Amino acid sequence: MSRLLELLEQDCMQTVNQLAARAEMTEDAVRAEIAQLEQSRAIVGYQAIVDWDQVRRESVTALIEVKVVPQSVDGFDRIAERIYQYDEVESMYLMSGSFDLTVIISGRTLQEVARFVGERLAPLEGVTGTATHFILKKYKEKHLVFKPEEPEERELIFR
Amino acid sequence: MNYESILNKRIQAVKPSGIRKFFDLLEEMKDAISLGIGEPDFVTPWHIRDAGIYSLERGYTKYTSNAGMVQLRREISSYLSRRFQLEYHYKDQIVVTVGGSEGIDLALRVLVEPGEEVIVPTPSFVCYGPLTEMAGGTPVYVELQAEDQFRLTPEQLKAAITPKTKVLVLPFPCNPTGGIMEQKDLEAIAQVLEGTDIMVVSDEIYAELTYGQKHVSIANIPGMKERTILVNGFSKSYAMTGWRMGYVCAAPEIIAAITKLHQFGIMSAPTMSQYAAIEAMRSGDGDIVHMRDEYDGRRRYLVEHLRKIGLPCFEPKGAFYVFPDIRPTGLSSEEFCNRFLVEEKVAVIPGSAFGPGGEGYVRACYAASMQDIAEALNRMDNFLQNLERKSARE
C-alpha cells in the first residue's frame, strides 16, 4: 500500500497500468486501493504544482508566524480551525518552538495579503502576535524545481 | 601521406562499430524519443557531486597515487565485502581505472598474447572483441540463446575451448539482453574451467542492477577468485558515467601488471572523480536502492506492454535493457530500427550491433522517463499495426 502511495505522491498523473506495473499489482487491485485510500482520506486530493511566474500572473505568497493562546479544552485545534477556514489560507501547520502556527497564504497582491493579516488574522480572539514573511522566489516545492527546462545535452554514445 | 601504410595494421583491421549509419540517422532527428543510449537518465546524486566540487574548492587538483587514492581503495574493498562478500585487499588487489572500460582493456592486455583466443559470449557490449584484437588475440564468439535465458551454458563453453583459449569474458548482468548468471550457472562454468589455465575477465558493471535476486560474482565461487579479474565501476550504480570511474580487482601479481600499464598510459584516474567516488561508496547505498526501484518499475511496465503489443520478450533480470524478439515482424533488426526511427521517431538499437546472436532482436533502454517509455510503447504499437496492415495488403 505504501508503495502505491509513494508512486502517486511522485506523480498522480500516471495511468493505472503504469502504476500496476511499478507497484507489482494488478490493475484492478490498483483501482480498488486508490478508491479505498480516497475514501479513507489517506489521499486528500490531487493538484497541479504551478509556477505562476511562468505565466506572468501576479501572485504573492506569505508565510505568517502566529502566536496564539491555546484553549483549555481543544488546545490549539479550535483556534487553528478558525484560521484555516479562510479560503486565503493555503497551508497551515502547528509548530514547535518560539511560535505556534505557520500559516501560508497566497493572494493576488501585497495589499490583499496585508488586509488578511490585519483584518482577519490579527484581531482573532486568542491570537497574540503575528510575523509576516513574504516569499520572494520559489525554488522548489514537493521535490519539483521551479526552473525552465534546459535543453537536454545528452550526446549520442554507443554504450 | 599514405596513412594506410603508416597506421598500425592491427588497428586498421579492427572494424568500426557497425551501427555508425544508424547513429548518423539518429543524429539528424533531434526530437526523437531515445531508448537508445545505454546510461542512467538520473543525474549523479547531489551529495556525490558536491563531494567532487568540494575537492576542487579545497584545491585537490594534483595526481593521486597510480593505483588510486588509498582512501578510495579502502572504500572499494569494504564496499565489495559489504555488498557482495568479496574480499580484496586495498593495498595490492585493487586498481582505480578511468571507467570500467579501461579496466576491461587493461585486463585483456595483461593476459592476451598474439594467437591466443578469448571467448566472448554474445550478444554483449561491443568492446570485448575489438579490445581482444587490439591486444593481438582472437575473439571466439559464443551465441547465447533466449531459451537459455541468455546465460552461458557449460556445454557451450566446453565446445568453445581450444588449446589456444586464454580468457573467458563474463559480461553479466548483460548489456543488451538483461541476462544474469545465478550461483548454480556460475558453478557449472567453474567446473568446466577447473584444471585449465583459462582466466576469467568478469565485467560486473551492472552488479547493483539486478531485480529479484542479488548479483553473484564468479569470484564468489570456490577456487575461482584466483583466476578472475573482476571489473566494476561507478557509472551504472551511482549514475556517474561522465566521471569515468572504474576499478579492477585481482590477485596481487595481476594487479601489479595492470598497474604498470595504467601508470604509463594514464598515470592516475581523475582526482576530483576519486573524491566523488569516495562519497558515493560511503553514503550512496540509499541512492542505489532508489534508482534500482525506479528502473525495476519501468522494466516491468516495458516488458508487460511489449508482450501485450505482440513482441515476445525475455524477462531481463539485470542491467537496464529489454531485448524483445522482433522476428515476428519479418524485418532484420537494422531495418526494424531504421523504419521505427523514421516512421515513429523512436530510437532503439539493432541487436546485430551486439555481435553474433543479436540479429532478430532490438535493445531498448529503460533508463528513460516513464512518459518517454509510455509514449515509445504507443508508437511501437502503432508501428507494428502499420506493418501488419502493409503486409496484409501485399
Image (cartoon, coloured by chain):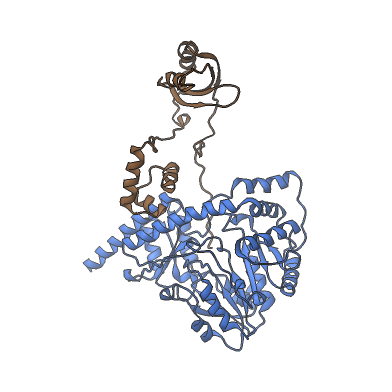
Chain colours: A brown, B blue
In the displayed structure, B317 sits above or below A39; it is below
What's the residue at 41%, 53% (across, down)? A22
The spot of residue B229 in percent (x, y) is 65, 72
The spot of residue B234 in percent (x, y) is 61, 58
Instruction: Give the side of residue A14 with respect to residue A121, left or right.
Output: left
The spot of residue B254 in percent (x, y) is 72, 74
The residue lying furthest to the left in this view is: B393
For residue B34, say whether it is visible.
Answer: no
Instruction: Give the side of residue B115 with respect to residue A50, left or right.
Output: right
The residue lying furthest to the bottom in this view is: B163
In the displayed structure, A53 sits above or below B329; it is above
What's the residue at 26%, 65% (across, down)? B388
Depth check, front residue: B14 or B222: B222
The spot of residue B293 in percent (x, y) is 49, 54
In the displayed structure, A128 sits above or below B358; it is above
Q: How many marks?
A: 0
Depth check, front residue: B154 or B368: B154
| Quadrant position of residue B297 | bottom left
For residue A32, say whether it is visible.
Answer: yes
Depth check, front residue: A90 or A99: A99
